Amino acid sequence: MRQTNLFAAAAAALILACIWGWASSTLNRGATAAATPLSVHIDPFEAMMQSKALPTSDYEDYSLVFSARTQLP
């Protein structure tokens, strides 16, 4: 009986904490500022044109490697 009351109290506290967190996040929705100003624009094409000395990667395609024992007709 004692464990049931402890479990019920913990569940009620968790539910109240969740409701309080949800309510406070919706009330302060308009007060939060954006992380970056809206006037900052990133041009992806310009970034690609200005990039120099990027590392390259080599890819070996072994999907069509045949065994030496394979004989073609």
Image (cartoon, rainbow, N blue to C red):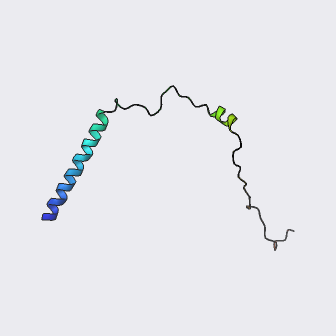
58 lies above or below 37: below
Residue shown at the point (67%, 36%) measured from the top left: 48
Residue shown at the point (25%, 43%) measured from the top left: 19
Viewport quadrant of the C terminus: bottom right
Residue shown at the point (31%, 37%) measured from the top left: 25
Closer to the camera in the image, 12 or 45: 45
44 lies above or below 11: above
In the picture provided, is 58 more to the left or to the right than 7?
right
At which x and y percent is residue 71?
A: 84, 71
Closer to the camera in the image, 52 or 42: 52
Residue shown at the point (34%, 32%) measured from the top left: 29
Closer to the camera in the image, 65 or 55: 55
Q: Which image quadrant is residue 72 in?
A: bottom right
Viewport quadrant of the N terminus: bottom left
Which residue sits furthest top?
39
Which residue sits furthest left?
1
At which x and y percent is residue 2?
A: 13, 64
